[in-house]
Image (cartoon, helix red, strand yellow):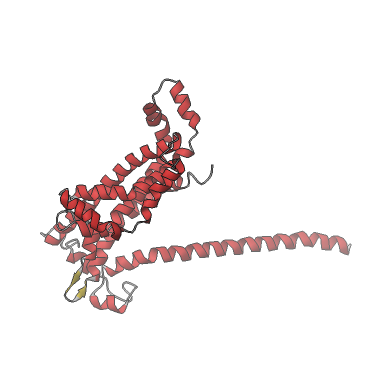
Amino acid sequence: MAISTTSSEAPGRSETAFRATMILSRVLIYGALILWAFVSLFPIYWTLTTSMKSAVDVTQGHLLPWIDFQPDWKGWRSLGLSPDTIFETSTVRDEFVARFMNSVITSLGASLLAVVIGSLAAYGLSRFQYKFAWMRNRDISFFFLSQLILPPVVLALPFLVLYRELALLDTTIGLILLYTLSVLPIVIWIMRDQFDTIPIELDEAALVDGLSLWGAFWHIILPIALPGMVAAFILSLVLSWNEYFFAALLTSSDAKTLPVMVASQTGSQGINWWSMAALSTTAIAPLALIGIFLERYIVKGLTAGSVK
């Protein structure tokens, strides 16, 4: 009788221990996720709150609004973007709008151009076999990606001289072409992996059904590769939007972008942290919204080549 009691209690104890282990593992996982979310979101919180601080609150490191400091529209008012100045005439706001539109035009233009050219190049590398000297498809793909190894400062003088000769200094067209070259290797790499996951039998079936090579690419392959194209477009957009070095080097007034304006918030008495924080918030907001609404495309596109 004692043996049967012990055997009946053992499964109950093991089940309780299993549940406790599961609860503990979930607590640790969610705790780690919450900690990582805090680390990731804290810079955004700090930037947003800094745009509403006075100089004293910034230097003393006050963090909690209405507890450590009284929020104010100081940073936004300096840009003419506060609720009490939004409808008034402001030269600073006009400059901000011009710089913001320059960033939009250059980023969208470069990203669209890079996705179009990169998709065509990646499709060719995925479907056809090329030979250039000792280089094959894999070597050519790596050659494109290796262009990212060069630091921007190495290319500064050649581009400065070239753009001066071509009259592309301080133009949005010049920035679009340069940004396209900068993000094109990443687009080719992402899209090549995307096309590699699509069976070549689909191309062959489309050709048998009477479609041309371009027709098969446009009507069959391209819709399937759309998540990868969206992911490549968003990544190109982020890199182009945040680019500062060449924007500061190759522009002077007309084609300046938002990152250049953010970095220029310095005066004779130091850095205007509140103005810089307000500008940084406006620069972060569009990318954050794009990431939120297109998250599923980003995940699908970036993980397309991980499992074959």
Quadrant position of residue 116: top left
Instruction: List x then y, in percent, for residue 145.
Output: 40, 49
At x 39% / y 44%, what residue is drawn? 188
At x 39% / y 27%, what residue is drawn? 213
Quadrant position of residue 41: bottom left
Q: Is residue 145 above or below residue 275?
A: above
Residue 78 horizontal side relative to residue 209, left or right: left
Instruction: List x then y, in percent, for residue 234.
Output: 35, 48
User: What is the quadrant of the C terminus in the image?
Assistant: top right
Quadrant position of residue 270: bottom left
Instruction: List x then y, in percent, for residue 86.
Output: 16, 59
- Nearer to the camera, 170 or 103: 170
Instruction: List x then y, in percent, for residue 259.
Output: 25, 60
User: What is the quadrant of the N terminus in the image?
Assistant: bottom right
- The reply to whether residue 47 is in sight is yes
- Nearer to the camera, 137 or 289: 137
Q: Is residue 214 above or below residue 149?
A: above
Residue 289 horizontal side relative to residue 270, left or right: right
What is the total number of numbered labels drawn onto the structure image?
Answer: 0
Q: Is residue 137 above or below residue 263?
A: above
At x 29% / y 60%, what residue is drawn? 153
- The reply to whether residue 73 is in sight is no
